[in-house]
Image (cartoon, rainbow, N blue to C red):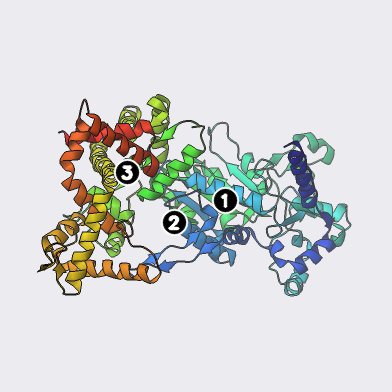
C-alpha cells in the first residue's frame, strides 16, 4: 500500500512538471503549427471536450420519431435531461463555428433542484480535467492576469498571413498589462515574450469564474471587472497605469474558459450591463482603460418566476435579446428518476442499510406524478401516462401519442417535487429504518410526513400530493402482490412448467390446424381455446391479436431450437407474465390462506419460508423486507 502511494505521488509530480511547460512566443508558434487546435476559442474548446467524451448521434425510433443524441460526457451524472443537453450541445456546436450565437448568454431556466447548477458544475469540472490532457492543452502569455491567447501578440497587419500559414483564426487584442510589458520589458520584440501552459482551475481562478449575487449595498462591480490597486498607485503615479489595476474580477479570470452566473437575474442592473457589453462586443469595460477583449462562454441559471418577472420588464429587452434560453424541467421518466436517487444515495454513507426492492421506484413514481399535467385523453390515467413517458407499453397508445402529449404540455416538469425533496425524506426514513432495511411503505410514509415541512405548498397542492401518495400506494399494492405471486409460482415450478408445455401443445395444433391426441385414450380433439384464452387474457391480448401472438411464440421457439437453445416459460417475457398471472389466479386462495394465517401450520410455514427464500435469492430482498412484503400481501388478500 505504501509503495503504491509513493508511486502515485511520484507520477503526480511528473504530471505537474509536464503541465508546467514554459517557453517563448517563438516556441509557441511551433506548437500551433503542429497542433492548431491549441489556439481555438472558448466555445470550440468546450464543444470539443463534450465531443471527445463520445456522442451517439440521433436516430429514429420504431415509430419514425427521433431519439435524441446521447452525449456521453454526462453519462452517470444527469438523468432524463436529454432534450436540454442536446440544446446545449447544438448551441456549442454553432458557437464553435464562430456563428453569431457565440455572442449570446446561455440561460438555463427551470425549477429548483432540476439539475441546472449540476450541468454547469460538470462543465467546469470537465474543463479542469480536459485542459490537463494533450487534446485540451491551453497556453497563455506568462504573467497575464487574463491568461490570454499568445497569438494576440501578432500585429494586426500580419494576422491574415499568419492565419493562413498556421491554419488558425486569430481575434482579440492584448490586455493593458501585456501591452505595457511588451513595450517596456521586451522592446516590442514579440518573439521573446514568455508563454506557459495553463490548467483551468476554479479554485485557482484560472479560466473559470463564478459570480453569485448578494446584498446590493455591499456587492461591488469590482467582483466582475477588478479594481484599482491602491497600494501601487503611489509607485506608478496614476490610477490609469496598467500595473496599478488588479484585473482579477470574475470576468477577467474566466477569459478563455467558462463564466457561471448563479441566479443570474437576481444580479443588480450594473452587473447585467457588464454582461450586455461582454455579449455584444466580446469585451469588458474596466476602470479607466479601453475595452478589453474577452473570450468566454457565459452561462447563467435562474428559476421560472425570476425569468417571467425579468421578461415583463421592458428595460431588459436588450439583454433578453442577447440570451439563448434552455428550459431544464424535472425529469419525467420513472427509470431515470430511480437512477438519480441511486446516484445521490451512493454518494452518502449508507453502509449496512438495505434498500428494499421497489423502494426507490415508488418514491420516483410519486415525484413524477406531481410533475405531470392531467391527461387530456379520456382513457388515460395519470399512472398510465407515467408508464408511457417511461417507454412502457400501454394498450391503445403508441410512441406517436407520447410525442403529442409532450408537445401539448409545454410546462410539464416545471412544477412538482424535486429529487432533493425526495432524497431528504428518504434520508430521514433511513435513519428510522427498522432492521437496517428501508422499504417502500416506509418511504411513502416519509414522503407523506415531509409534506408537513414542505415550505411554499398551498393547501390545494398538499391535498393533491396526498392523493398522489395514495395512488402510488395502490400501484405498489399491485407490485407487491406480483412479487409474492412470482415467488409462489416458483414454489409451484413444476405446475408452471406443465401449464407452459400444455399451452405450447395447444397453440402449435392451433397454428398448424391439426388436432391433439389424448395420451391415455388416444382420442383426437381440437385445441382448447378456453385454456389458451385464459392465459392470453392475463396480459391483455385481444381476440383479434391472438393468432399473431401465438405465431410469434412458435417463431421464437423455432429460432431458439435452430441455435440449439432450450425454450422454457421464462424465455418469453410476456408469456412468462401471462403464465404467472394465470397461476396466481388459480392459486389465489392458496396464497391468501398461506400469507394471511396468524398461526400457520407446518405446511404453510414451509411454503412461506420457500417464498421468502426465493424473494431473497432471486429478487433482491433481505429476510426482513421479504417477510414484511409477504405479511403485507396477506393483509391485502385478506381484505
Q: How far from the left and from the top, in percent, is residue 8?
A: 74, 43
Of 473 and 19, the residue lying toward us: 473
**How many residues crowd mark 3 within 10 Å: few (<14), some (14–19), many (20+)?**
many
Q: Where's residue 533, x and y in %? A: 15, 60
Distance between the Cα atoms at labels 2 and 3? 20 Å
Q: Quadrant of residue 396?
A: bottom left
To which quarter of the image does residue 174 belong?
bottom right
**Mark nearer the N terminus (1 vs 2):** 2
Instruction: Say which quadrant the C terminus sits in.
Output: top left
Q: Nearer the viewer, residue 284 or 377?
A: 377
Residue 423 in the figure: left or right of residue 575: right
Give the residue displayed 57% in from the left and 31% down from the top: 218
Horizontal relation, residue 375 to residue 557: left or right: left
Q: Which numbered disc, 1 or 2, marks the residue closer to the eye?
A: 2
- The image quadrant where one finds the N terminus is top right
Identity of the residue drawn at 31% across and 61% down:
403
**Which mark is in front, 2 or 3?**
3
Q: Earlier in the sequence, mark 1 or mark 3?
A: 1
Give coordinates of residue 486: x percent, y percent.
Answer: 28, 46
Q: Which residue is mark 3?
A: 365
For label 1, the SS is helix
Q: Could you say which is closer to the camera, residue 181 or residue 255? A: 255
Residue at the location (16% across, 74% down)?
514
Mark 1 and mark 3: span between their CA atoms? 30 Å
Q: Is residue 287 above or below residue 56?
A: above
Report the residue at 68% width, 58% height from top: 136
**Which residue, given by chain and number where applicable, does mark 1 sit on?**
123
Residue underneath mark 2: 82
Amino acid at each position: 500500500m505504501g509503495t503504491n502511494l509513493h508511486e502515485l505521488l511520484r507520477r503526480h509530480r511528473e504530471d505537474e512538471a509536464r503541465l508546467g511547460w514554459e517557453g517563448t512566443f517563438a516556441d509557441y508558434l511551433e506548437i500551433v503549427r503542429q497542433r492548431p487546435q491549441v489556439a481555438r476559442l472558448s466555445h470550440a474548446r468546450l464543444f470539443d471536450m463534450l465531443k471527445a467524451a463520445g456522442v451517439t448521434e440521433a436516430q429514429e425510433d420504431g415509430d419514425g420519431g427521433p431519439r435524441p443524441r446521447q452525449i456521453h460526457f454526462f453519462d452517470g451524472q444527469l438523468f432524463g435531461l436529454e432534450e436540454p443537453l442536446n440544446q446545449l450541445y447544438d448551441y456549442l456546436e454553432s458557437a464553435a463555428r464562430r456563428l453569431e450565437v457565440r455572442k449570446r448568454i446561455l440561460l438555463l431556466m427551470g425549477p429548483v433542484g432540476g439539475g441546472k447548477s449540476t450541468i454547469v458544475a460538470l462543465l467546469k469540472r470537465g474543463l479542469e480535467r480536459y485542459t490537463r490532457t494533450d487534446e485540451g492543452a491551453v497556453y497563455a502569455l506568462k504573467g497575464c492576469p487574463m491568461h490570454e491567447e499568445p497569438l494576440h501578440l501578432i500585429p494586426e497587419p500580419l494576422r491574415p498571413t499568419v492565419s493562413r500559414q498556421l491554419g488558425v483564426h486569430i481575434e482579440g487584442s492584448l490586455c493593458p498589462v501585456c501591452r505595457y510589458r511588451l513595450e517596456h520589458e521586451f522592446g516590442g520584440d514579440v518573439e521573446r515574450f514568455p508563454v506557459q501552459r495553463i490548467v483551468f482551475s476554479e479554485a485557482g481562478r484560472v479560466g473559470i469564474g463564478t459570480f453569485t449575487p448578494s446584498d446590493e449595498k455591499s456587492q461591488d462591480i469590482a467582483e466582475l471587472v477588478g479594481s484599482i490597486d491602491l497600494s501601487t498607485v503611489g509607485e506608478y503615479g496614476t490610477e490609469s497605469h496598467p500595473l496599478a489595476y488588479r484585473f482579477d474580477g470574475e470576468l477577467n479570470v474566466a477569459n478563455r474558459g467558462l463564466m457561471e452566473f448563479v441566479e443570474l437575474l437576481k444580479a443588480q442592473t450594473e452587473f447585467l450591463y457588464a454582461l450586455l457589453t461582454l455579449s455584444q462586443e466580446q469585451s469588458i469595460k474596466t476602470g479607466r482603460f479601453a475595452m478589453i477583449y474577452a473570450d468566454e462562454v457565459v452561462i447563467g441559471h435562474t428559476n421560472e418566476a425570476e425569468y417571467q418577472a425579468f421578461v415583463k420588464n421592458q428595460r431588459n429587452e436588450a439583454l433578453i435579446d442577447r440570451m439563448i434560453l434552455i428550459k431544464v424541467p424535472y425529469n419525467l421518466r420513472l427509470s431515470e428518476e430511480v437512477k438519480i436517487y441511486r446516484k445521490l444515495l451512493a454518494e452518502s454513507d449508507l453502509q449496512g442499510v438495505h434498500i428494499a426492492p421497489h423502494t426507490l421506484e415508488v418514491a420516483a413514481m410519486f415525484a413524477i406524478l406531481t410533475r405531470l399535467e392531467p391527461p387530456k385523453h379520456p382513457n388515460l390515467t395519470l399512472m398510465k401516462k407515467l408508464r408511457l413517458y417511461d417507454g412502457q407499453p400501454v394498450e391503445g397508445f403508441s410512441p406517436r401519442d407520447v410525442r403529442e402529449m409532450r408537445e401539448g404540455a409545454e410546462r410539464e416538469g416545471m412544477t412538482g417535487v424535486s429529487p432533493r425533496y425526495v432524497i431528504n425524506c428518504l434520508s430521514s426514513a433511513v435513519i428510522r429504518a427498522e432492521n437496517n432495511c428501508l422499504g417502500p411503505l416506509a418511504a411513502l410514509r416519509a414522503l407523506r410526513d415531509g409534506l408537513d415541512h414542505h415550505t411554499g405548498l398551498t393547501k390545494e397542492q398538499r391535498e393533491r400530493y396526498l392523493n398522489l401518495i395514495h395512488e402510488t400506494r395502490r400501484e405498489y399494492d399491485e407490485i407487491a402482490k406480483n412479487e409474492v405471486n412470482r415467488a409462489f409460482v416458483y414454489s409451484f415450478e413444476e405446475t408452471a412448467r406443465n401449464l407452459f408445455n400444455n399451452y405450447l401443445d395447444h397453440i402449435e395444433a392451433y397454428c398448424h390446424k391439426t388436432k391433439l391426441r389424448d395420451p391415455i385414450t388416444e382420442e383426437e380433439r381440437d385445441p382448447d381455446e378456453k385454456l389458451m384464452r385464459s392465459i392470453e387474457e392475463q396480459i391483455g391480448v385481444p381476440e383479434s391479436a391472438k393468432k399473431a401472438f401465438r405465431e410469434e411464440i412458435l417463431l421464437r421457439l423455432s429460432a431458439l431450437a435452430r441455435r440449439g437453445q432450450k425454450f422454457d416459460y421464462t424465455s418469453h417475457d410476456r408469456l412468462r407474465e401471462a403464465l404467472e398471472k394465470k397461476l396466481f389466479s388459480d392459486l389465489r386462495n392458496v396464497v391468501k390462506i398461506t400469507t394471511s394465517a396468524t398461526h400457520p401450520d407446518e405446511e404453510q410455514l414451509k411454503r412461506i419460508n420457500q417464498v421468502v427464500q426465493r424473494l431473497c435469492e432471486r429478487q433482491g430482498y433481505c429476510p426482513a423486507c421479504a417477510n414484511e412484503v409477504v405479511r403485507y400481501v396477506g393483509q391485502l388478500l385478506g381484505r
